């Protein structure tokens, strides 16, 4: 199973304060829209998302079909196949990708400690 690019999506209280803090750590804005209260920031191969007012807890995020530069990969495991493999292993999905579609889709699961994991395919 190829999970693709990895990032941590952080829920923040003040996106401007958080942006400045992570810039001090060497991160640079890579994507997003601060006027919509979300940014994607990068420091070498480390990627974080800053999200103000969009969700309650931090989320581990995987993007099948992308590398760490958000570039499309030639070969990757489609999200619907991942979903099937996880279900076959008895992992409960909190939300599911529509198996009758192709392309972009997502699903969510929780790890044994309650950490939310979003698998979000953009291609």
Image (spheres, helix red, strand yellow):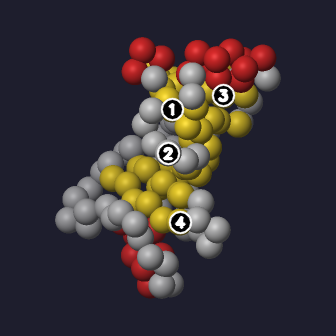
- Mark 4 lies on a secondary structure that is strand
- Horizontally, residue 87 falls left or right of residue 114, namely left
What x and y, as percent, mark residue 11? 55, 37
Residue receiving disc 2: 56
Task: Tell me which numbered mark, 1 or 4, is placed earlier along the sequence.
Answer: 1
Task: Tell me which numbered mark, 4 or 2, is placed earlier along the sequence.
Answer: 2
Q: Is residue 43 above or below residue 20?
A: below
- Mark 3 lies on a secondary structure that is strand
Residue 7 can be seen, yes or no: no
Foreground disc of the pair 1, 2 = 2
> Quick one: label 1, few (<14), some, or many (20+) residues within 10 Å?
many
Foreground disc of the pair 3, 1 = 1
Foreground disc of the pair 4, 3 = 4
> Quick one: label 2, few (<14), some, or many (20+) residues within 10 Å?
few
What x and y, as percent, mark residue 120? 43, 50
- Horizontally, residue 11 falls left or right of residue 104, namely right
Residue receiving disc 1: 51
CA gap between label 3 and label 1 equals 15 Å
In percent of the image, x 57 and y 22: which residue is there? 14
């Amino acid at each position: 199973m190829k999970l693709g690019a990895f990032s941590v999506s952080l829920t923040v209280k003040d996106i401007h304060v958080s942006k400045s803090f992570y810039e001090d750590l060497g991160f640079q804005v890579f994507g997003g829209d601060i006027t919509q209260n979300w940014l994607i920031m990068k420091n070498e191969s480390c990627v974080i998302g800053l999200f103000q007012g969009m969700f309650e807890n931090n989320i581990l995020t995987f993007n099948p079909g992308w590398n760490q530069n958000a570039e499309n990969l030639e070969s990757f495991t489609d999200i619907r196949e991942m979903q099937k493999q996880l279900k076959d292993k008895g992992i409960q999905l909190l939300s599911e990708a529509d198996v009758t579609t192709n392309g972009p889709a997502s699903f969510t699961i929780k790890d044994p400690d309650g950490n939310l994991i979003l698998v979000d395919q953009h291609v």
